[in-house]
Image (cartoon, rainbow, N blue to C red):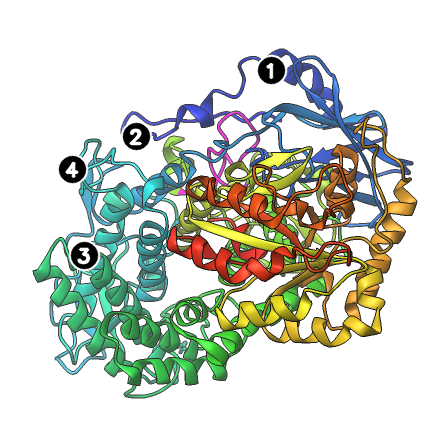
Amino acid sequence: MHKRLHFSSGGTTNCSPKLTSFLTASVLLWMMLTATTTLGADNAWIRINLMGYKPGSVKVAVLCSKGEISVEKFKLLRASDNSVVFEGSAGKDFGAYGPFSHTFRLDFSAVHETGTYVLSAGTTVSLVFEIGDDVYDGAADFVLQYMRQQRSKYNPYLRDSCHTADGYTMDGPMPDSTHLDVSGGWHDATDYLQYVTTSANATYHLLASFRDFPAVFGDAHLDNGLPGSNGVADVLDEASWGLQWLLKMHPRSDWMFNQLADDRDHKGFRLPTKDTASYGKGRERPIYFVTGKVQGLGKYKNRTTGTSSTAGKFASAFGLGYEIFKDTSAVLGNKLLGRAKSAYEFGLRIPGNTQTACYVSPYFYEEDNWVDDMELAAAQLFGVTGENRYFNAARGYADQEPQTPWLGADTAAHYQWYPFINLGHYELAKRAKGSARSQVVAYYREGIERVYGRASKNAFLRGVPFIWCSNNLQTSFAIQCYWYRKLTGDTQFEALEQAAFDWIMGCNPWGTSMVVGLPADRDFPDDPHSSLNVLYGYQTLGALVDGPVYGTIYRKQLGVTIVHGDEYAEFQSPYVVYHDDYGDYATNEPTMDGTASLVYLMAAMQAENGLANFTLDHGAIVRGSRKDKKIAIVFTGDEYADGGNTIQRTLKENKAKASFFFTGNFYRDKHFSKLIRQLKKDGHYLGAHSDKHLLYCSWTNRDSTLVSREIFMNDLEANYREMNRFGIIRESSPYFLPPFEWHNDTIASWTASAGLRLINLTQGTLSHADYTTPSMKNYRSSDEIMNSITSKADQMNGFILLMHVGTDGERRDKLYDRLPELIAHLRAKGYELVTVNELLRSK
């Protein structure tokens, strides 16, 4: 289902070559495969991430069938010649989901080679897709197009002005109808209301995108949004547009406004430059003061209880704005810092939530929480001021709402828990230490686990409820998973994180991207609920649409109609629906704040190096990033542990961390139990090294695998069972180091299918020869080994330096006795000694 793509003469596009040139070498194959993917011989489809996958990412497609299907294996084929690159197990049948009766997760994460591929399972074939380091390049800037299109006051897309008379005050300490210039900012969605609730959150996401991923963004637009270059990244131009409006909405320390216009705006499709909505005062629109009390000028009232939610969002956006702009503009920086502090104090006036106000209908953003906003504000202010009172306040707020309440829930009211994740936990965890940091990080993990409890039951790993703006929740949840992984190095939820992103980009029951125009040559929403589309056929490029909703929600909506026919009719179900039709405002309306969140997620995905930044050998990671002066010292053990106490004591005395990979034999030996517990207590990484120390493949013919998959899996599971006795679970120990430090591609593939990552030592030194004895031909003395390391010490960035925790008694020249010397030498060379999970943590 390839969609039409509209462009207007008045708009600008920002399609990178990567996003528009996909139908080149693979065009013929893609055309041939389209029929099979639209309706496979088994009435089945393979859903993929339409943008493709990064080499080091989790890579999973979903096979879906509406009829009976029997499939045990799937294949990954090179698109150019149909050669089989990888063959994997289709795994378990997850059963029914939406319109499908059978679903399977096709995991090809073990494939890291870049190229263009297709997947086949039985007679069903996927669309052509790419694995590459650059598959997401340009995406974050592409998404920014919609933000520019939503600008009020001067709109660069239409190259015209709108809403320049805003506005007149209501409910404030000044006389009602007092004029105050609050022109600017962004329209909220297809309507033209403007809320601080969504705008401040959007501004924060844009600022954070630049702070965290500055190299991702280009400079192809001026500050007014028109094409050109002004020496400022476009994402900062857009964030500045948001900050300028927010400053107008908090013009002095004792004045704060929450909303511009109200639901009198809802009067049909029209361009913002031709807005005829009347609020009783010419072209001016009302501005609602933050009173901390129930509001509503007509029959319907909201349920406001305080000032904190809006004030906290102001303070966090201003605080991050100060952090970014203080060095380039002292005047702006000082202004932002002052407003951040005053907004925070305003939030303390009446602790509680501020909801948006309605007039003609009971429609408003039903935000019920507020401590998350104050936590973010306090954490941000602590970061820029260093004042402990802010840190202590943030810590207290974090404990009041450990998890955003919708996480793991079936439903929620419209924007009831907003923002959709707790941004404050991330900012606080970055600045906290010790138990305070651990506790906040645990809050993130517990929220993710709640969603995973639902997600693990279906092949799409979908655990987010299908309420209005479900795509916004999905995007935010992907960000929470990403932040948790960055804070901890824990990859146990990486598949869940990737699945959340993949869903947005096409790995969903409908097989469509949820972003207008992205990718340009695949299925995406081209009939969004937008005045620009309906009236003139202009596209809302970069916009994230609301997304699917429960069938029960859809059937209750008033005024929903399918105008152009339901092209996804065969993929709808009583459970959940999505329509790419402008008549369905419940699933296909773009939102400004959801799109701003997507800017952050797209920037993170583009910046994510994954395994592309690592060195691989036969499918195993054998070296970390060469850019960072980090080394992971690794010790393996099976039957010997004579060096254990010496190593443990030396590491503790030198305040160094290391990693230990033990066999099940080692974990079972009661003589080693005390050492294992002490190493765990000291914070070292403890991992698996097989159960019985099997030789997996021939020494002379590496491709000859000596064990069956069943033997491998059973042995691996036995190793982890022994680890569990010490409280070491596979989710926190996802790296597996093969016995004898010897493996092949088959072992790497089997390891990946078990949800683990195979690693091995970095070649180039003789450190691993410390097991040799004088009677062996390959014997190496400790002097030789140390010389091999010190002579290489200027070229060891990212090294996995392997030694043994014990050796045969015949060897008297123990390398572990030289560990203090080794640590001192490496540190003198500027290396940071880290655990393997820290070394391999993606940037």
Of pointers 4 and 2, the one earlier in the residue sequence: 2
Q: Amino acid at mark 2?
A: Thr
What amino acid type is highlighted by mark number 1?
Ser
As drawn, the label of residue 26 is 1
Q: Position of residue 798 (x, y in %)?
A: 50, 45
Give the SS element for disc 1. loop
Q: Can you see residue 546? A: yes
Does residue 315 appear to the left or right of 455 in the view shown? Answer: left
Q: Residue type at mark 3: give it.
A: Phe
Image coordinates for residue 161, horizontal then vertical, percent:
18, 43
**Which residue position is annotated with label 3?**
325
Tell me the quarter of the picture where residue 44 sits: top right
In front: mark 4 or mark 2?
4
Where residue 623 sits, quadrant-wise, is: top right
The three-letter amino acid code for the residue at tag 4 is Asn
Q: Nearer the viewer, mark 3 or mark 1?
A: 3
**Residue in the foreground of this view, choosing between 824 and 438:** 824
Tag 3 and tag 1, C-beta contact below 8 Å: no
Report the residue marked by disc 2: 12
Q: Secondary structure at mark 3?
A: helix
Disc 4 crowd, CA 10 A, few/some/many (<14, 14-19, 20+): few
